[in-house]
């Protein structure tokens, strides 16, 4: 078993996957860093029938001071996995979750968001991010791996939070639609597997995780889904049950973020964790506001079954895109306003020079401003955007 785990953690396994998919380090990079034989470097040079080398050389940031060059010989895999990588990043959450809430079946969207965001996503992402800073397992070494991403290089590798988030959203969506829509289970399962698999493979292709990191992330998420599933119905009705819920939803995540494990050097994991937990807290509070002040009807005990998925018409598409555009504009305005205001207050309180980017990384500034900003964004998305939609006459 130990030998198997070591082999799954081997950077060479990731490098071989990249080569099979047509991603190679530039010959001069491989020669300079590995001391490889010149003949081997020549064998990796662009061959006849490929685009000119100058058009295929691109840059990938690595922890060292130089810029690593790489060669793409299969652009289908390159664009497929680069796109798949975005499905596990914040930009996908910012677009998918609001679109689901504002435009898809309200029964389903409420159940999906109220379960997935506060319970599965927050739990999964917090455990995943904390585990990285506790285990401190390195990412695949470069060379031989080509790294295509810059931002998360400072983070540790185990487990892959991209794999965790993708598995969580794919399979909670699958389970949530089982009681609402009647369509083949095989199709449902295939969609979930394809989505999560593409994101997982993208972490290998971009050189950011070992196979063991990815498998660890998937298994941790699967375990959390199994353990929390019996409580989903209870969580679905909890948001309107107690006036003390907002206090708990704010205090507990903020405490966890403020007492995040201390790392040897600064990495974006604490900021990312705070963003996720704060957005989840904001969404939960938004739903609580909606039902406590009767801004929406009380959720039904059980979801009525819809026999067929509603067809996508031109009018539906235009309406959905309009509501999405209006909502995103309001969210961005709220985010910018609250962020600037919270930073100004914190800078004044701690007597820090305004616009000091390094000061943003201090615990007493980073966690409060991130938490206030994204809690506000979550409340805005679930409460104020739907109110604006109704005011503008957008059904």
Image: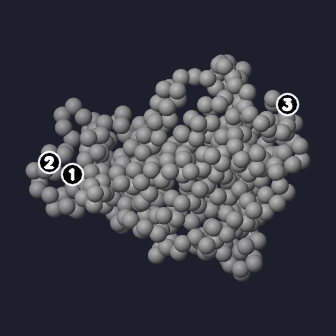
**Dot 1 or dot 2, earlier in sequence:** 1
Identify the element where label 2 is drawn.
helix
Q: Of callouts 1 and 3, which one flags the residue occurring earlier in the amino acid sequence?
A: 1
Residue placed furthest toward the front:
230
The colour style of the image is one colour
Horizontal placement of 342 versus 190: left or right? right
- Viewer-proximal residue, 42 or 178? 178
Residue drawn at 16 percent across, 62 percent down: 35
Residue closer to the observer: 54 or 87? 87
What is the quadrant of the N terminus in the image? bottom left
Helix, strand or loop at label 3? It is: loop
Residue lying at 50% horizontally and 51% vertically, measured from the top left: 223
Q: From this viewpoint, which residue is outermost toward the bottom?
A: 351
Residue 213, percent from left and from top: 39, 55
Q: Where is residue 140 in the image (x, y as percent from the top left)?
A: 33, 58
47, 179: nearer the viewer = 179
Image quadrant in which the C terminus is located: top right
Provide the residue designation for mark 2: 42
* Residue nearer the viewer, 370 or 33: 370
Is residue 328 visible in the rendered image? The answer is no
Q: Do the residues labelled 1 and 2 touch (CB within 8 Å)?
A: yes
Residue 33 coordinates in the image, percent (x, y): 22, 62
In this rendering, does residue 265 appear at all?
yes
**What whole-number distance in Å separates the C-alpha atoms at marks 2 and 3?**
65 Å
- For this view, does 191 lie left or right of residue 56? right
Earlier-in-chain disc, 2 versus 3: 2
- What residue did someone put label 1 on? 27
Give the answer, above or below, for where 106 lies relative to 270.
above
Residue assigned mark 3: 393
Cα separation between marks 1 and 3: 60 Å
Q: Nearer the viewer, mark 2 or mark 3?
A: 3
């Amino acid at each position: 078993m130990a030998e198997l785990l070591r082999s799954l953690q081997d950077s060479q396994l990731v490098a071989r996957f990249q080569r099979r998919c047509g991603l190679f380090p530039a010959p001069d990079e491989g020669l300079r860093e590995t001391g490889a034989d010149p003949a081997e470097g020549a064998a990796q040079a662009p061959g006849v029938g490929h685009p000119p080398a100058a058009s295929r050389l691109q840059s990938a940031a690595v922890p060292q001071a130089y810029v690593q060059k790489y060669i793409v010989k299969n652009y289908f895999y390159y664009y497929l996995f680069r796109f798949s990588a975005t499905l596990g990043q914040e930009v996908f959450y910012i677009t998918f979750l609001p679109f689901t809430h504002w435009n898809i079946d309200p029964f389903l969207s409420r159940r999906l968001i109220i379960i997935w965001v506060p319970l599965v996503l927050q739990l999964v992402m917090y455990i995943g991010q904390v585990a990285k800073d506790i285990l401190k397992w390195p990412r695949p070494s470069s060379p031989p791996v080509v790294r295509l991403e810059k931002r998360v290089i400072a983070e540790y590798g185990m487990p892959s939070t991209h794999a965790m988030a993708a598995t969580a959203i794919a399979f909670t969506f699958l389970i949530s639609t089982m009681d609402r829509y009647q369509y083949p289970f095989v199709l449902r399962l295939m969609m979930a597997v394809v989505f999560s698999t593409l994101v997982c493979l993208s972490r290998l292709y971009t050189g950011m995780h070992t196979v063991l990191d990815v498998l660890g992330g998937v298994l941790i998420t699967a375990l959390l889904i199994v353990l929390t599933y019996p409580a989903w119905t209870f969580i679905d009705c909890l948001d309107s049950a107690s006036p003390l819920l907002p206090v708990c939803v704010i205090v507990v995540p903020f405490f966890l973020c403020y007492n995040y494990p201390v790392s040897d050097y600064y990495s974006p994991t604490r900021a990312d964790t705070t963003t996720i937990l704060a957005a989840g807290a904001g969404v939960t509070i938004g739903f609580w506001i909606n039902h406590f002040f009767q801004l929406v009807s009380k959720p039904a005990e059980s979801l009525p079954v819809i026999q067929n998925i509603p067809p996508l018409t031109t009018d539906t598409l235009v309406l959905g895109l309009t509501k999405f555009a209006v909502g995103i504009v309001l969210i961005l305005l709220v985010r910018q306003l609250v962020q600037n205001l919270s930073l100004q207050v914190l800078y004044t309180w701690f007597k820090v020079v305004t616009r000091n980017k390094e000061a943003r990384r201090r615990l007493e500034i980073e966690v409060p401003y991130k938490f206030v900003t994204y809690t506000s964004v979550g409340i805005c998305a679930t409460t104020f955007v739907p109110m604006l939609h109704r005011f503008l006459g957008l059904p």
